Image (cartoon, coloured by chain):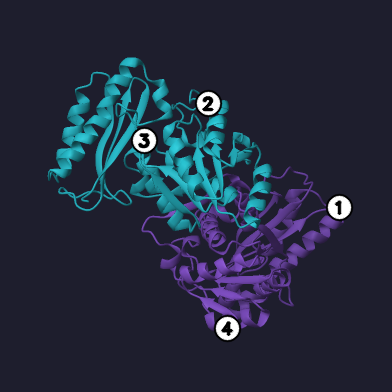
Chain colours: A purple, B cyan
């Protein structure tokens, strides 16, 4: 029997019981419109924890004023079925009012380059919204482990820093990007794409895969990767680049001209009104 | 036997054991230079919790660039003796590096009027520093109850909002102001006062007490309290007023001309270089 909670009090009461029983808790925070990427997170959580909480909340504070908060896909019934089928113990689907109980905000914000580069440049308040809602969920759910996808590579780095700096007692588990058969990274926003845009968007996964190939064959110049991937994307008439960039991991430090250690090659590209992100890690194995 | 920890790892290991044993934890966060005000917090914590953690940390992020971070009194040996004598289970006295492990900060910030009025006006980053360090201590110590003094009346309101907004699972226990025999509110900063300044500073407690008397006798005009207390303080040659103000509780909302419900009458006044605060609550009983 999967429990569904819509209020903070219901959730807190249940978590209290679970903690008292000494059970380990896995948390999978989502904005719903669940796809196989989310499914992989839930499966991993179910495998390694006694009690798994999936949260479904389209968090308004991580959307900018001109972004797609209103049109973001909402598919609660299908999400509940999937979570249940995958073995989740509890789904928490609160209202915005429940998660933001005061008129004025209390923010959690990771500052510095880490939240200014890549998506932070075009979405300056996005990661503040993410850090704030994830902090709230950590305090409510008290997870032993929390699951996030590598698809949101910058979010992963921001949350790792937040957990370290604020001493949250939680293990972050980062799961690999899940792709469609044709290589498109799974995203709730893929639902926005026209047939032509979806076809054009394949350039992202394809060019990142080729870049990794070039890395394996010895390429180490950061600029070579940026030029190659930018060039491939530019060939697509329907694509409009937000960024193609290389940063060092962890913490997204500026790379040297010749990359070494673990680096992130990340892209954000518009296809029509739809902004997609994708990335790969460049590292010697 | 009282435990003394200087590192985050030592503290975490101990708290893990305490949690496993199902013990309740009381937290008393301090900046050291412990006086009878702190002693009252520690006593209350010892009375009501199985395990009491006193933290001693002069938190740099709550001091402004021109404030007294360097000269703030540091009396660790005496503090440890007092904490032990009062029955504290553990003192956590970390380094700044331990509490702020990254070059760039992760902030917790309560926004809005609540942190802009009173001390927030002359100390614009103070409450961000307070909210951030208290969040870190909550995550490390996992307290059942946390103890703060009503002397820092605005801090109390800020932390109540933070706990509510971020869903910290902790009960805030607020203890009354402790005063010297002559009415001066206990403060680590009283140590800065010359004999003449200390004598002059008695005007704060004295005028607040008279204001409460006037409230009891039926005065309800916010301006009357402000005028009276400002006038009394202005008579002291060594006093320089930062603010004398009335706000509604909770959340420090603007008062109406005729106050009703619970209100805070708060003052901040310089005596030489030393800035003292004091306050009283005006409410019908």
Q: Viewer-proximal residue, A25 or A30?
A: A25
Relative to residue B250, is residue B83 depicted above or below? above
Q: Quadrant of residue B264?
A: top left
Residue B74 - label: 2
In this rendering, do the residues under marks 3 and 1 share a single chain?
Answer: no
Q: Which residue is drawn at 45% across and 36% down?
A: B38
Spot occupied by residue B167 in the image (x, y as percentages of width and height): 48, 59
* Residue that mark 1 sits on: A218
Q: Which of marks 4 and 1 is in front?
A: 4
- Contact between marks 3 and 1 (CB within 8 A): the answer is no
Task: State how far apart marks 1 and 2 are (Cα).
Answer: 57 Å
Q: Check disc 3 and report its element: helix, strand or loop.
A: loop
Q: Check disc 1 and report its element: helix, strand or loop.
A: loop
Which mark sits nearer the N-terminus, 3 or 2?
Answer: 2
Q: Is residue A26 left or right of residue A67?
A: right
- Contact between marks 1 and 2 (CB within 8 A): the answer is no
Task: State how far apart marks 2 and 4 are (Cα).
Answer: 59 Å
Q: Which of marks 4 and 3 is in front?
A: 3
Q: Residue at x 60, y 69 (%)?
A: A18
The answer, for residue B279, to whether it is visible in the render is yes
Q: Is residue A107 left or right of residue A174?
A: left
Crowding at dot 4, Cα within 10 Å, few <14 / some 14-19 / many 20+, comes out as few
Which mark sits nearer the N-terminus, 4 or 1?
Answer: 4
* Residue that mark 3 sits on: B178
* Residue that mark 4 sits on: A78
- Contact between marks 4 and 1 (CB within 8 A): the answer is no
Label 3: chain letter: B
């Amino acid at each position: 029997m999967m429990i569904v909670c819509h209020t903070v009090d219901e959730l807190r009461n249940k978590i209290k019981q679970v903690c008292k029983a000494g059970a380990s808790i896995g948390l999978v925070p989502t904005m719903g419109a669940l796809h196989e990427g989310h499914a992989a997170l839930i499966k991993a959580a179910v495998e390694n924890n006694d009690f798994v909480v999936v949260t479904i909340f389209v968090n308004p504070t991580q959307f900018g004023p001109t972004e797609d908060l209103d049109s973001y896909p909402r598919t609660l019934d299908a999400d509940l079925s999937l979570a249940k089928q995958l073995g989740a113990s509890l789904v928490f689907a609160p209202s915005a009012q429940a998660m933001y109980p005061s008129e004025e905000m209390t923010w959690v914000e990771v500052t510095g380059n880490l939240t200014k580069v890549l998506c932070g440049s075009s979405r300056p308040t996005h990661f503040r919204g993410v850090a704030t809602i994830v902090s709230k969920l950590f305090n409510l759910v008290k997870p032993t482990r929390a699951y996030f996808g590598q698809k949101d590579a910058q979010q992963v780095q921001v949350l790792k820093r937040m957990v370290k700096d604020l001493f949250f007692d939680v293990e972050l588990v980062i799961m690999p990007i899940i792709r469609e058969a044709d290589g498109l990274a799974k995203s709730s926003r893929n639902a926005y794409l026209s047939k032509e845009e979806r076809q054009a968007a394949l350039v992202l996964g394809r060019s990142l895969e080729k870049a990794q190939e070039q890395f394996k064959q010895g390429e180490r110049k950061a600029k070579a990767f940026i030029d190659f991937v930018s060039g491939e994307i530019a060939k697509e008439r329907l694509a409009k680049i937000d960024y193609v960039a290389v940063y060092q991991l962890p913490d997204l430090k500026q790379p040297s001209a010749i990359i070494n250690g673990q680096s992130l090659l990340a892209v954000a590209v518009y296809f029509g009104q739809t902004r997609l992100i994708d990335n790969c890690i460049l590292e010697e194995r």
